[in-house]
Image (tube, rainbow, N blue to C red):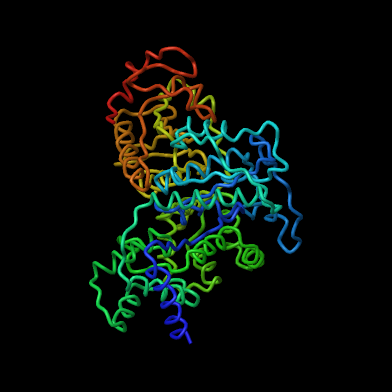
Amino acid sequence: MLEEEFEERNKRNLKLRFGNKDDVVLDVLDFAGQGEYYASHQTYIRKDAIFILAIDTSKDFNQRKKHKEREENKSIPEAVNKNLFLCDRPGVAFTCWSPKDYFYYWLKTIQIHGGSSERIIFIGTHEDEKRKDFNFVHLLNDAMAENLVTKAYSKPIIIDLCRYDEVTEEALTEIKNEICMLINKCRRENRPAKWVTFSSRFEIIKRKYPIIKIEDVLEMIDHFDFEMSDTEVADMLHFFHTSGKIIFFNMSRLQDILILDIQWFIDCFKHIIADRQHVEEDCRIVDVKDQKMLRNFHEKGVLEISLYKKLLTQKGISKQYQNTLGEYQSKLGMMFYVQNYEIDDGSSIDGWYVPSINTQEFKPSNARYRSNESSQILCFKFKDYLPYDFFGRLIVACVNSGHWHPYDFRLCKAGADMCYQKSGNEGEQIYLFTSKRIVTVQFIGKHSEQNGQEVKQEILTIVRQLVQFYSCSTEYELGFLCRKEEGYKENSVNHFVSKRYKFCQGCSQPCDWVDTESFWKEVRI
């Protein structure tokens, strides 16, 4: 039955794609709006995609979303009931945002993972309820000032999809024309007909096998009338990945597996972080240790490895794929593997850190970080935008180096209170922090010159490696905050002082101490 369906589908696709050289086949995807999906949207972002960004013109763009308590589920123990579900809990990475926050999120995500904002069509909805103070052009120009949009848009499309009349039809026609115009600007390349054969085969296979081994692909080739070299197979899979058909990375630990069903992959992640069924079941398990690990995960974002495997087994994922699935999610910035992570009973665990789950607020000690004994605050300022998953990647890279561990388990969503210890030296306290476009580093209390040089070099090396993950140019500048008092705030970026200009925009005055701060002086950009 599958073979007959495959042959019929293959004939249709070949006729559609090669019957007329001007024909174009588009795969349309509607992104989910629930909070638990926001940590995984980058999975679908591709360089050659066209994006339609819909904006509700009836909403106050600066009004932050208030958290609404859901009705308590009596089947879940009260002690953990209020801290379980990502989209229902205050304090996680993607909740309580304003419409403008979400708008900027999408622009940044498209830029970071798609590499450009030139293929975005902006559409305003709810025309009949449009606010009088809503100005689409001003909104886009503000985004352009933040380097989130690369050109001025003088005529965004505003439409009321709740009705269908001549005005609506004209707006829909305009949207179609915009899509056609962007398609014509896209680079077109001829692909072998046998690749289309594989595309059709994958569409059918993924219904039963959402994830397969590369050796299964090679076995398929043996049953076809054509031959393909290993290089051509890799090129074909790379093409399917870049066009959003599959997920495949031709790199160590990932190249032996390919994911055919991207939505299944996303749902696996959602199952781990927010699925109500497994939460209810796991809360009833007798094992006290597992209950404690589950609570720790939903508070701090660290999922012990055995519990991770138990959740995936419950999802029906065989053990042979569980580690690779985690590696793929790590590659895409959804979660990261940590080793020897210390927990509150003094023991350590291996597991997966999911930054989007972490609700811990970073509350540095004012007396400590403002002390004369503490160093000035070293600052990485990113030119246009800081990727949302960057700080999580940075923290995990530090922890996995073996030289860092959190003090009092203080691994927070926007900061970390860390102990740095290397080569048998006495451990030193360091604050790592992020806000808007900056990442900061500060030694707390007494600190040695030797450890200072090691930390500077280690952090700089990690940052240089991490910026290679993203499609766009992620440029940054190294400098300081003008005063310790300006650290650890949402607007700390306004008090960035570069080594070149030595001027603080936030204070509107020069900052001469940059030349005399010997502790950070030898940092090389």
- Give the residue drawn at x 52%, y 74%: 316
Which residue is most to the front?
Answer: 166
Where residue 31 appears, x then y in whole percent? 55, 55
Where is residue 443, by image quadrant?
A: top left
Give the quadrant of residue 61.
top right
Give the vertical position of 1 relative to 137 (above or below): below
Front residue of 475 and 145: 145
Say which of 164 and 443 sits in front: 164
Q: Nearer the viewer, residue 207 or 54?
A: 54
**Is 268 situated above or below 331?**
below
Q: Is residue 318 left or right of residue 523?
A: right
For the question of whether residue 320 can be seen, the reply is no
Across and down, in percent, residue 254 comes to 35, 63
Specify the quadrant of the image occupied by residue 376: top left
Q: Nearer the viewer, residue 391 or 266?
A: 266
Residue 82, position as x, y percentages in the image: 69, 52
Total numbered badges shown on the rendered structure: 0
What residue sits 30% from the left and 76% below the top? 218
Which quadrant would the C terminus be assigned to in this image?
top left
Whether residue 522 can be seen here: yes
Residue at the image point whose x is 39% and y is 66% from the top = 20
Q: Name the spot of residue 472 as percent of width and height, x first.
A: 37, 43
